[in-house]
Image (tube, rainbow, N blue to C red):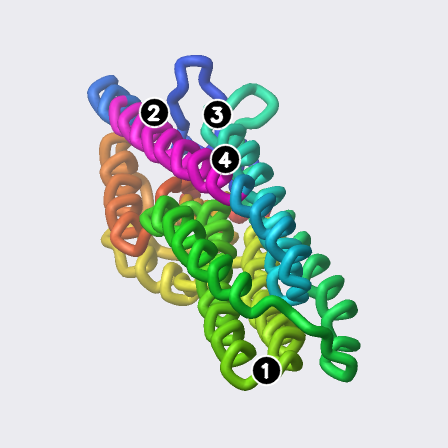
């Protein structure tokens, strides 16, 4: 009979040496040593990537804070609600970049006895907070901008144009620093900065239009357009973060497809109690109970697990936990 793993599905045993127990049976020492090296290399690569993301976030934060101060001063001097609304938006971005930086630094920590999956989900929490701040900020600015469409006020169009040119350059520089990352947290911050670039392009065109035609109503209209655009991007960020925190199946995966892929592997009779989720939008986990074909040796079971992991790795699964069951043994903890 196959050796059964008694831990609950979706959980991994903690080993002070830093090794994941990906299955329930223990193979030869060479196999364990290989898995340990693979896990160590994977975690080392993740830490290096996290360090790069933290560095990019720190630079983007510095650029954004400096320019936010410039925006507030310039917005008051030009009496432009569009610039002030973007300053409020950039202030929110500065706060969210600071949160993203703090969360990303925490997310880079390894697992512990109380955080057996590590701190990766803090990156997702940062994305959630970022989205919430953007939504609240955009709604607040809309409340103040809409009345000025009916009662437009004079603005300094020349100052708007100068600030817009600086705004495009500064925000594009900050966005460029984050454009290469796959972290959900940093990607959310990147989208905010990209929105700022587009917003400042709109302010630039609006300043030119006001200077040519003296159409001061363009200023509040731009403010409304910018914030509606921000809302259209912030809400999906919130939804994606919530999907991760609520442990939805990652959007690019299908449970049926995974079941079919594992069931097609030689030696697998049935797959059930399957769970698939992601910690932070980039690191995906899988657990399942697999019924094997009759009596098999320990070496044969280890080979079966390796085939399952190799098949799942092809579709982007990073962490696999398998519980093997003999045919007819029944499932005693399939309550989820």
Please report whichever mark, 4 or 1, sits nearer to the chain's N-terminal start. 4
Q: Secondary structure at mark 4?
A: helix
Q: Is residue 52 magenta?
A: yes
Cα separation between marks 2 and 1: 78 Å
Cα separation between marks 3 and 2: 28 Å
Please report whichever mark, 3 or 4, sits nearer to the chain's N-terminal start. 4
> Mark 3 sits on what residue?
109
Q: Magenta residues, as a range?
A: 37-64
Please report whichever mark, 2 or 1, sits nearer to the chain's N-terminal start. 2
Q: Secondary structure at mark 2?
A: loop
The crowding category of the residue bearing disc 2, from other C-alpha atoms within 10 Å (few below 14, some 14 to 19, many at least 20), is some
Q: Which mark is residue 214?
A: 1
> Mark 4 sits on what residue?
104
Estimate the x, y position of residue 249 in percent, counting from the top left.
Answer: 50, 58
Q: Main secondary structure of the magenta part?
A: helix
Q: Residue at x 72, y 69 (%)?
A: 142
Closer to the eye: label 2 or 4: 4
Q: Is residue 13 magenta?
A: no
Give 61 or 159, whichever is nearer the viewer.
Answer: 159
Whether label 3 touches label 4, CB < 8 Å: no
Cα separation between marks 4 and 1: 46 Å
Relative to 67, say whether 51 is above or below.
Answer: above
Closer to the eye: label 2 or 1: 1
> Mark 2 sits on what residue?
26
């Amino acid at each position: 009979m196959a050796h059964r793993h008694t831990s609950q599905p979706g959980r991994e045993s903690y080993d002070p040496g830093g090794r994941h127990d990906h299955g329930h049976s223990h193979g030869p020492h060479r196999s364990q040593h290989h898995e340990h090296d693979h896990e160590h290399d994977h975690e080392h690569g993740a830490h290096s990537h996290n360090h790069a993301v933290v560095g990019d976030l720190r630079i983007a934060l510095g650029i954004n804070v400096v320019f936010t101060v410039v925006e507030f001063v310039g917005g008051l001097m030009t009496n432009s609600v569009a610039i002030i609304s973007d300053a409020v938006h950039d202030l929110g971005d500065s706060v969210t970049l600071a949160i993203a930086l703090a969360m990303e630094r925490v997310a880079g920590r390894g697992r512990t006895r109380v955080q057996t999956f590590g701190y990766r989900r803090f990156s997702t929490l940062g994305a959630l907070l970022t989205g919430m701040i953007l939504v609240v900020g955009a709604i607040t600015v809309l409340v103040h901008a809409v009345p000025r469409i009916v009662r437009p006020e004079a603005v300094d169009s020349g100052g708007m144009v100068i600030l817009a040119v600086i705004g495009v350059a500064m925000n594009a520089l900050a966005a460029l620093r984050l454009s290469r990352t796959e972290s959900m947290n940093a990607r959310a911050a990147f989208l905010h900065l990209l929105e700022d670039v587009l917003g400042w392009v709109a302010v630039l065109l609006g300043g030119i239009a006001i200077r040519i035609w003296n159409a001061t109503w363009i200023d509040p209209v731009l403010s409304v357009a910018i914030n509606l655009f921000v809302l259209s991007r912030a809400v999906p960020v919130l939804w994606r973060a919530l999907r991760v925190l609520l442990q939805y199946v990652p959007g690019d995966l299908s449970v049926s497809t995974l079941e079919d892929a594992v069931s097609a592997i030689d030696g697998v009779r049935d797959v059930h109690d399957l769970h698939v989720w992601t910690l932070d939008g980039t690191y995906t986990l899988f657990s399942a109970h697999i019924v094997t074909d009759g009596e098999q040796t320990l070496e044969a079971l280890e080979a079966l697990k390796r085939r399952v992991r190799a098949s799942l790795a092809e579709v982007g699964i990073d962490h696999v936990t398998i519980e093997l069951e003999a045919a007819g043994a029944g499932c005693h903890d399939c309550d989820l």
